[in-house]
Amino acid sequence: MTGRILIVDTIPTNRIVLKVKMLAAQFAVDACASRQEAEEIIAKRRPDLMLINLSDQIEDRHGFCRELKDNPDTSSIAIISVGIADTARARFAALDAGADDVLPRPIDDALLLGRIRSLLRVRHARQELMLRDGTSRALGFEEARSDFKKEGRVALVSNATSSRNAIAAKLKSGAFLPIMQFETDCILTKTSMMPVPDLFIIDGSKITDQGQSLFRLVSDLRCRAETRTTSLMIILPDNQPEVAALLLDLGADDSVSGSISAGELVLRSKALIHQKLLHDKLRNTVRDGLTAAVTDPLTGLYNRRYVEPHLVRIAEQARAAQREFAVMILDIDHFKSINDRFGHAAGDMVLIELANRLRENLRAIDLVARVGGEEFLIAMPRTESDQAHAAADRVRRLISAKPFPLGGDFSPIKVTVPVGVATGGLTRLDRGQIEKMCGYADAALYAAKSAGRDTVALGSRIAAA
């Protein structure tokens, strides 16, 4: 995994040693001694991750970390604190300042690289989601932004009741309630039935198989749809850097020692829950933005943007199955007069009701889209010419059979539609030919209007090759 790393350490020997290790791991590396130099490098070549010695006696490195995390432009830079004293107080201070992890010296190379890869993986995923989110907002599909206040769900996983209780007691000091508890042996069978947690804390402090069971569990949780985005923290015995590094590479988000203090456990847990909830929010925004991009906001039908690629897929399937498909285009007779007489709100009600009738009376595999003001398109896979004509006539009749409500004090009115139909699909259709087929349906629509409206007309057919 590529990435740019910035090393900030006053001691030249420390900088040199870390830089050599990072270069050997194929990272792009910058190194400096002071905060001012670091700020200049960040402005020119923003790093993905920083290795920073927070124990500097001259500069306020903790304050520097806080400023980086508080600044939206640099908040996504991952930070690993190196070189501090290995005490609960020092570790807590580093995490509280915004460090994503703390690795006191001597630093185990395997653990350091595993942690870097894990943090870069998370950062790259967040960058992609934020890029897509930004695109959605640029297209005008932004929802009101608000800081989420949802309390994260935590699940403790351990076969030892005493261990679960001890970990739960530490978490409760940070107001994590309620906390679900599960035995390791049954967690995989429970994930499909329980509310999926935002954080799994898996107790591996009593491992007896060199971590093999933990490796399998983390891999299984990461490959399951229900739990693949849930944060994973693994608790290990002291001095198990190789196991910790492999767990991080398999998808764990954090690995801590069984002797971790309550304060540090709470800080790390809150950070992982925040990370998970933020990614969930970004995914939801992207999903909603994509839906909005291809959906007509008034009727809920697909829009013109969705139609073209979908017709390409229908054409590919039709050719493979050697079956024709049909395209229908219809609009509302004298729709302008409805708007003029009753107002645009009444016209909107007509469009919504028409969309509902189409949606409710066509097959699930049929595409129904609003492609213009009062113009609708229907695509019907595996439909021959005579079948398409019959379906179009049925659609025409179901529209005119029952008056349309207008709301307010207006009485319901009769609405009629002309329908133009075109078929094709036994030959290879590219986008140009599909546009031609839609043109045939559109020409047939105008023929239906000329024939007296409220009727169906068949257009030219794309002949088989």
Image (cartoon, grey):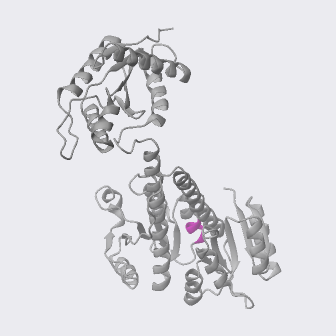
At x 39%, y 85%, the residue is 173
State whether residue 119 is above or below residue 205. above
Q: Is residue 386 positioned above or below 159 on the image?
A: above
Determine if residue 324 is in view. no
Check the image and report above or below for 388 versus 352. Answer: above
Classify residue 404 as left or right of residue 233.
Answer: left
Q: In the figure, is residue 137 to the left or right of 396?
A: right
The N terminus - image quarter = bottom right
User: Residue 309 location in percent, x, y?
Assistant: 49, 31
Q: Identify the residue at horizontal 50%, vertical 52% (top origin).
A: 140
In percent of width and height, residue 75 lies at 60, 70
Task: Give the residue displayed 35% in from the left and 12% down from the top.
Answer: 385
Q: Relative to the observer, which residue lies in front, 295 or 244?
A: 295
Residue stretch in magenta: 241-245
142 relative to 455 in the view: left or right? right
Q: Does the image show residue 405?
A: yes
Asked if residue 285 lies left or right of residue 102, the reply is left
Q: Main secondary structure of the magenta part?
A: helix
